[in-house]
Image: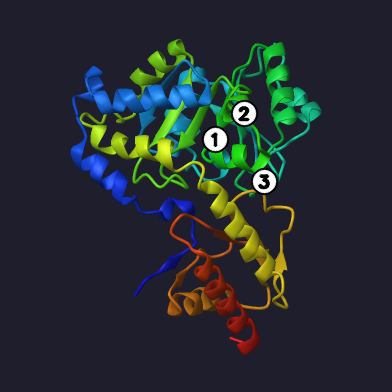
Amino acid sequence: MRWIDVRSDTVTTPTEEMRKAMYEAEVGDDVYGDDPTVNRLEALAAEMVGKEAALFVPSGTFGNQLALLTHTKRGDEVIVPDSNHIFVHEVGAAAVIASVQLRTIESPNGMPSIEKLRASIRGKDIHYPDTGLICMENAHSSGRVLPLEYLESVKKLADEFSIPVHLDGARIFNAAIASKVDVKKIAATADSVMFCLSKGLAAPVGSILAGSKKFIEKARKGRKLMGGGMRQAGILAAAGIVALEKMIDRLEEDHENAKLLAEMLSEIPGLQLMKDQLDINMVYFSLETHEPDLVIKEMKRAGIKINPPEGGMYRLVTNKDVVRADILKITNTFKEIVTSGV
């Protein structure tokens, strides 16, 4: 049975070209800097986002938390919108790894006003922690893309106070394609940027942390501290090279499929589509008339994997293993569930 999996774009399987590249990868000990394939991936990644250097890391969460560890000192405060992945879905790691405090700003779309950001920056007082970092996320996990002008305003504010900015750019290439903006311009709004190879780009493992040479040199030691020295990692990096060279342009197909899915789902009675969250490959909706456990069970019976709703919202994520015919099956299955009164 072929499963249709729209739980996330992390479920993508590597392409045949990736598997071949992994099999043939030239490797060395990356902790010593001797893995030529890792070195090639890092150079390519840095160039693509316009940064001086880059570091291959095991995951997106790892990359974000390594950025916090590298930018800050123990006891610092990190400003982050309360809907961002770093706060919501990274297991409280900031407190454990970097020993920093997160100062969250209420913002469902990851775009608190510049005035709110300014008000959250700590002044000089013996009772206050230092504001050590501001974190943004683009594309945002709400399915929205943050405008370049907004990110530039955040960077301008941060520079005014000599505070670095880190961008969780797990889906930065989705953001660039959706907004028709050069990815380098998005990355330029932050001192460091993390992006995932293992989401829509379909590599089996890995993310990239990019920044200045000095920042990456410090981060490399932090990666070792966090257990991320992966030795002959070229076998994994080889797939990442294919992901960056071959898989970015096709992200537009995922966006188009998401819009088609949204359009078809919007015709189902009782299903409330979030029409303002359709910038990339995510479709959000609520279905309050049916118990989530039953919906998931019936979808699974039809060979479709979905996640339970979070905060009352279902999220379906298109990816390279979801084709147009799958969109029709997903929609028809939801329609059958609603009309059958399950």
The residue sitting at 43% across, 27% down in the picture is 45
Residue 303 x, y percent position in the rendering: 43, 75
| Residue 122, visible in the rendered structure | no
For marks 2 and 3, give the CA distance. 14 Å
Q: What residue type is labelled 3?
A: Arg
Which quadrant of the structure image shows residue 163?
top right
The residue sitting at 50% across, 80% down in the picture is 298
Q: What residue type is labelled 1?
A: Gly
Residue 162 x, y percent position in the rendering: 65, 11
| Residue 162, visible in the rendered structure | yes
The first of marks 1 and 3 along the sequence is 3
**Label placed on residue 169:** 1
Q: In this view, does 264 lie above or below 10?
A: below
Residue where numbered disc 3 is placed: 144
Residue 145 x, y percent position in the rendering: 67, 41
User: Are there few (<14), some (14-19), or many (20+) residues within 10 Å of tag 3?
Assistant: many
Image depth: mark 2 or mark 3 in front: 2
**Label placed on residue 186:** 2
Q: In this view, does 151 lie above or below 11?
A: above
Q: What secondary structure is found at the residue carrying circle 2?
A: helix
For marks 1 and 3, give the CA distance. 13 Å
User: Are there few (<14), some (14-19), or many (20+) residues within 10 Å of tag 1?
Assistant: many
For marks 1 and 2, give the CA distance. 9 Å
